[in-house]
Every structure is written in structure tokens, then in C-alpha cells.
Image (cartoon, helix red, strand yellow):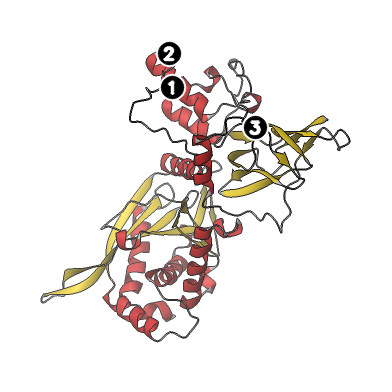
């Protein structure tokens, strides 16, 4: 018998590391060629890694939540001595069998595995690397560097336990605890009512992205009240006489069409800001991200080229993407490329919110719930269906006046819905 090392393959252009989210095997299992060994996540997409040969698992690279370097050892197999090379990178799955897809159950599965690891799984963390010398650039993921900067921690003083001495979140946490107490923290007593839940998979990606957006973008939030009585009447009539096969109209398609018209007059709001290069990338196509809650967490499927879609096409695409995001079939292309985002909590939308911009975009439009409120019409108070729009803007590149003007244009169209369909 011989040992065969399966290395983590290149799972995407420009990707240097991936998060281990799920094992499909354990030490001692006999696997067949092409059987799935485990899954890693990059940029909210999950990739399954197959076995390159028949064999028995004798070693696994860590546990769910660990960050693995591309090309590092992933699995070690005991194989027939006549098998091919002893060390090999696993062949990435074929496009038909493994299109990059979001898996809503990955985070839950990873959490269960972390909580109930099989007793015969080997703990094989590499030995801690020596502390970095002055002038060296320590190895660490961008999210770890960001946390270290915010905490005032010097990464050169931290011993990394990841591949090639890479500093992990756990390494940083241990360093910060030692800094506060002067010693390594003792574990919680078994009777203490504390549950430690490791943030892995999609939840970690969300946390990292929110941290980047919050720390790097100075937000300005503008809240405006909108009278949607006429719009709700129109929506009810259109839904009442819609043809078979057409989707039900919600508020979102009307808002999308209003945004497209407003963006035509303020195209600099439909953009990405590369703050490191100091460049605003203004887009001609309006690709609207729709923040969608799934069992695994928040994802943002994208309605591409909303400017080329009518009301019904927008509604159909929103419904299709929302379903794909929730059942885990949304592809990488469907989850990337937005240039401006809508976020809505539906009936739970509250009176006002302060939405966080979907970095690197420069604007996000938030929808709050519709409620009947007294409205002064110039002569008396009358009941009207009112809704607040809570919108945030990157104040580095969007002035308050432009932000207000953008929201006011949307408000005018929603309050007079005929304007959405008429070219002036």
C-alpha cells in the first residue's frame, strides 16, 4: 500500500485560499474515485472536491471553518501501490457536475460537524510558525488584517497555526485574550450557560463583507416618506387581471423601474468605487441586487440589465432568483455583478432602517413597510397608504444633495405611477 496526498486544487482565478465548510468523509472511510471528499467555499459559492482515486482516508486537513491555502494538503489516502503519483492536486469537478452553487444547508451542516466531530478524526493542525521578524509581512487573510487593525494588534507578534504559518482568526483571538489577561484564557466551566458557535461558511462571508462595508464606507442615510396609495391601487388592478403564467406583482418591480429612470439622470449612482485606486467605475447597465434572506443567511441575487426589462420581466426575474437563492440552485453569475442594491424586510420592514451598502457599490435603497397614516391634503387629514424609503450612500463620492435628489425622483414616480410607463 502507498500514501497519496490530495491537495486543494485551484478553485477559481485569483483565489489564494478557501474556507473548509463540510467533510463528506471521515478518517477510516473507504472512498471510490470521483467520490466527494469535502466542500470549500469561496465568495459565497461552494465547490465540492472529488477523490482522484480509490483508497482509504487516513488524514483530513482540519475542521469546518478552517481557512486552507490553495495547493495545501487536503486529504491523504492509503491507496494500492500501483496507483498513480503519490502526491496530486484533486481534479476540480466537471462543469456539469459541480457548477458553483450556493448551498443553504452548508452552514448548518458545518456547524453540526464542528459540534459533533467523529471520534476517529485526526487533529492535524500544523505546528505553530515562529513569530515574524520586524519587516516581514505576516501571512493573513484580509478579514484577519482588518480585525487586527481595528484592535490595534501587531500581526508580526502573533504565531500563525494555519498553512505555511498563516495567521487565522483563532490565532488573533488568542493573542487578544492574552493581551487582556496576561495569560491564555481558561476554558469555560462545563456548567456555565455559554454556547460557543463557530462562524463558518456563508455566515462568515457575510460577516467579513459587512465589516469591510462598515469600516471603509462613510454612510449617509436619507429617509423619505412616500404616498403609495395610487401605486397600490394600480398594483391590485394589474394583479387582478393578469394573464395566466405571469407573475404576481409586488412593490419591487415598480421600485426597480423607478430606479432605472432615476439612474438615467444620475448615472454616477450606478457605480462601484475602487477606493484603493481612487476610481469610480460607472456602469451603463443597471444590475440591481435584491437582498434575499435564505435559511443559510443573506445573499444578493442580481437582476441583470434591469434597464432593458419591463415591469413583468422584472417581477418574473425577481421571483425566479429569490427561489433559486433559497433552494441553493443560484449560480455564481446570478449572485455577482450588482451595481446598486434593494433591501426590503417586507411586512417586518419597520418605519425606518439604516441599510449598509453592498461594497463596492455606492448606493442602496431600503424599503420599509406600508401602513395607513393620516395625511394632510391641504384641507383635511385623510387616510393614505404610506411607506418610507431608507437609502444609504457612500458619502466619499455621493453628496447629500445628489442623494436627496435621487430619492425624490423615485418618490415622484411611485406617487404618480403613470410616470413609470411614460417617456417624457
| Disc 3 from disc 1: Cα separation | 26 Å
Question: How dense is the environment of label 2, judged by Cα within 10 Å: few (below 14), some, or many (20 and up)?
Answer: few
Q: Residue furthest toward the left? A: 380
Judge whether 193 appears above or below 283 on screen: above
Q: Residue furthest toward the top? A: 182
Q: Position of residue 327 (x, y in %)?
A: 52, 59
Q: What secondary structure is marked by label 2?
A: loop
Front position in the image: 69 or 49? 49
Front position in the image: 324 or 314? 324
Judging by the rendered image, the residue that carries numbered circle 2 is: 183
| Disc 3 from disc 2: Cα separation | 29 Å
Q: Is residue 53 left or right of residue 100?
A: right
Judging by the rendered image, the residue that carries numbered circle 3 is: 61
Asked if disc 2 and disc 1 are in contact, CB closer than 8 Å, the reply is: no
Asked if disc 3 and disc 1 are in contact, CB closer than 8 Å, the reply is: no
Q: Position of residue 270 (x, y in %)?
A: 49, 59
Amino acid at each position: 500500500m502507498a500514501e497519496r496526498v490530495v491537495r486543494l486544487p485551484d478553485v477559481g482565478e485569483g483565489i489564494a485560499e478557501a474556507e473548509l465548510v463540510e467533510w463528506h468523509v471521515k478518517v477510516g472511510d473507504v472512498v471510490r474515485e470521483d467520490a466527494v471528499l469535502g466542500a470549500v467555499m469561496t465568495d459565497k459559492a461552494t465547490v465540492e472536491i472529488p477523490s482522484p482515486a480509490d483508497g482509504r482516508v487516513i488524514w483530513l486537513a482540519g475542521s469546518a471553518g478552517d481557512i486552507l491555502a490553495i495547493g495545501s494538503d487536503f486529504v491523504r489516502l492509503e491507496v494500492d501501490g500501483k496507483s498513480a503519483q503519490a502526491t496530486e492536486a484533486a481534479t476540480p469537478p466537471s462543469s456539469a457536475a459541480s457548477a458553483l452553487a450556493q448551498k443553504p444547508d452548508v452552514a448548518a451542516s458545518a456547524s453540526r460537524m464542528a459540534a459533533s466531530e467523529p471520534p476517529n478524526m485526526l487533529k492535524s493542525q500544523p505546528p505553530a510558525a515562529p513569530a515574524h521578524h520586524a519587516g516581514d509581512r505576516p501571512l493573513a487573510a484580509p478579514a484577519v488584517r482588518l480585525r487586527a487593525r481595528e484592535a490595534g494588534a501587531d500581526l508580526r507578534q502573533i504565531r500563525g497555526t494555519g498553512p505555511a504559518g498563516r495567521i487565522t482568526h483563532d490565532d488573533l483571538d488568542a493573542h487578544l485574550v492574552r493581551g487582556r489577561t496576561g495569560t491564555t484564557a481558561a476554558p469555560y466551566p462545563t456548567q456555565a450557560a455559554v454556547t460557543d458557535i463557530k462562524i463558518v461558511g456563508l455566515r462568515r462571508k457575510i460577516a467579513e463583507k459587512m465589516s469591510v462595508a462598515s469600516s471603509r464606507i462613510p454612510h449617509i442615510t436619507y429617509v423619505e416618506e412616500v404616498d403609495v396609495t395610487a401605486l397600490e391601487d394600480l398594483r391590485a388592478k394589474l394583479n387582478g387581471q393578469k394573464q395566466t403564467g405571469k407573475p404576481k406583482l409586488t412593490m419591487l418591480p415598480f421600485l426597480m423601474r423607478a430606479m432605472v429612470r432615476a439612474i438615467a439622470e444620475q448615472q454616477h449612482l450606478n457605480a462601484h468605487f475602487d477606493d484603493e485606486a481612487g476610481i469610480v467605475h460607472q456602469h451603463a447597465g443597471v444590475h440591481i441586487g435584491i437582498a434575499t434572506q435564505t435559511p443559510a443567511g443573506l445573499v444578493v441575487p442580481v437582476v441583470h440589465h434591469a434597464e432593458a426589462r419591463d415591469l413583468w420581466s422584472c417581477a418574473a426575474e425577481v421571483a425566479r432568483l429569490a427561489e433559486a437563492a433559497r433552494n441553493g440552485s443560484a449560480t455564481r453569475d446570478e449572485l455577482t455583478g450588482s451595481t446598486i442594491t434593494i433591501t426590503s424586510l417586507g411586512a417586518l420592514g419597520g418605519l425606518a432602517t439604516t441599510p449598509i451598502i453592498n461594497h463596492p457599490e455606492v448606493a442602496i435603497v431600503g424599503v420599509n413597510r406600508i401602513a395607513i397614516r393620516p395625511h394632510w391634503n391641504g384641507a383635511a387629514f385623510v387616510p393614505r397608504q404610506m411607506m418610507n424609503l431608507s437609502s444609504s450612500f457612500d458619502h466619499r463620492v455621493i453628496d447629500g444633495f445628489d442623494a436627496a435628489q435621487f430619492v425624490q425622483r423615485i418618490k415622484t414616480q411611485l406617487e404618480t405611477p403613470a410616470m413609470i410607463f411614460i417617456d417624457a
